Image (tube, coloured by chain):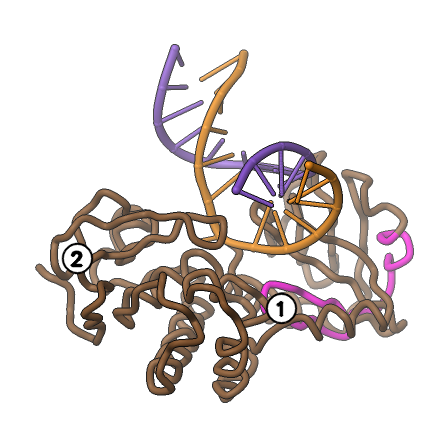
Chain colours: A brown, B orange, C purple
DNA sequence: ATCCGATGTCAAT
DNA sequence: TTGACCTCGGATC
């Protein structure tokens, strides 16, 4: 689940449900026991998303940093909540609001001090969901890397909140070969790509899913995407076989024709 | 019952 | 570049 759209949805949901309330905080699993004990009963002021990072700000001045990583999940229950599982790292609950959020498997769940928060935010590039006008910062950071574009888009210092699914879908829709050096993109390509990322992420916040292809609300997630996790299947535009190649340590999915040297991306609808 | 992979990141080679 | 970490659902035996 977790690219930038997920964290922004959580920030909004948890702010709506819990901000201004005293929150019961616990760590059934135990690995956050000390932090939970410190926060338990405190008033939550609000929750912010910065790329894939979540910051929970408490009236006491404490800041809780959560990063879901690859497998982390936050389940937010309204009404009667089930018992948290034994591996639940963190529970945030308001009995009066009948809300309980259960966090499992996070990469990070920790209290951070102001210096750590500053360092965290300083290493993030612009977040399309937080700063949709930040195309210039995006362009500068693309120009400063030697990496291929497909790899640069996974670098949270280049753009914050984009992950493996959004990078693949965005580059397909832009018709750009992911192996091209990021610094070689024309200004118009950078601008169009930034707008594309903003649009895809905003759609993700609205729906909670990464569905980029117009058809197929029915069926698996793969049926609602152009390339991500579709290696070996025909391209929805040209029927060429979608490829997966390692880029930035992960599988990069792309159409060899639509994203070939001749380029060609636009808003053409998919084939039948 | 067991294995494997996943929308992520970091530390150790 | 690789392995470790973390949890869970789906595939496989």
Quadrant of residue A158 within the rendered picture: bottom right
Give the spatial CA distance, label 2 vs label 1: 34 Å
Disc 1 packing (10 Å; few <14; some 14–19; many ≥20): many
Chain holding disc 1 = A
Write the start and end of the magenta stretch as one range.
A35-56
Instruction: Tell me residue A171's x, y (percent).
Output: 33, 66
Residue on which the image places disc 2: A236
Which residue is depicted at the point 63% across and 49% down?
Answer: A80
Chain holding disc 2 = A
Mark whose residue sits in front, 2 or 1? 2
What count of labels does the image hold?
Answer: 2
Which one is in front, A9 or A262? A262
Which residue is depicted at the point 74% across and 59% down?
Answer: A94
- Magenta span contains residue A24: no
Provide the secondary structure element on which disc 2 rests.
Answer: loop
Which one is in front, A189 or A126? A189
Residue on which the image places disc 1: A11
């Amino acid at each position: 689940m977790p690219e930038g759209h997920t964290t922004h949805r959580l920030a909004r949901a948890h702010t709506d449900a819990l901000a201004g309330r005293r929150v019961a905080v616990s760590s059934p699993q135990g690995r956050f026991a000390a932090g939970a004990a410190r926060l338990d009963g405190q008033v939550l002021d609000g929750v912010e998303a910065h790329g894939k990072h979540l910051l929970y700000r408490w009236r006491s001045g404490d800041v809780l940093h959560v990063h879901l990583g690859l497998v982390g999940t936050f389940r937010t229950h309204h009404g009667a909540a089930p018992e948290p599982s034994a591996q639940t790292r963190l529970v945030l609950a308001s009995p009066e609001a009948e809300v309980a959020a259960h966090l499992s498997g996070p990469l990070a769940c920790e209290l951070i001090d102001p210096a750590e928060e500053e360092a965290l935010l300083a290493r993030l590039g612009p977040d399309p969901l937080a700063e949709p006008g930040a195309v210039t910062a995006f362009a500068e950071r693309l120009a400063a890397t030697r990496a291929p574009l497909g790899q640069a888009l996974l670098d949270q210092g280049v753009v914050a909140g984009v992950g493996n699914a959004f990078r693949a879908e965005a580059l397909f829709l832009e018709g750009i070969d992911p192996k091209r050096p990021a610094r070689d993109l024309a200004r118009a390509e950078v601008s169009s790509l930034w707008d594309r990322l903003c649009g895809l992420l905003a759609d993700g916040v609205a729906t909670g899913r990464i569905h980029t292809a117009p058809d197929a609300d029915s069926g698996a997630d793969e049926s609602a995407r152009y390339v991500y996790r579709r290696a070996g299947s025909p391209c929805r535009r040209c029927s060429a076989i979608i490829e997966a190649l390692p880029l930035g340590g992960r599988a990069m999915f792309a159409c060899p024709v639509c994203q070939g040297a001749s380029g060609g991306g636009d808003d053409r609808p998919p084939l039948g």
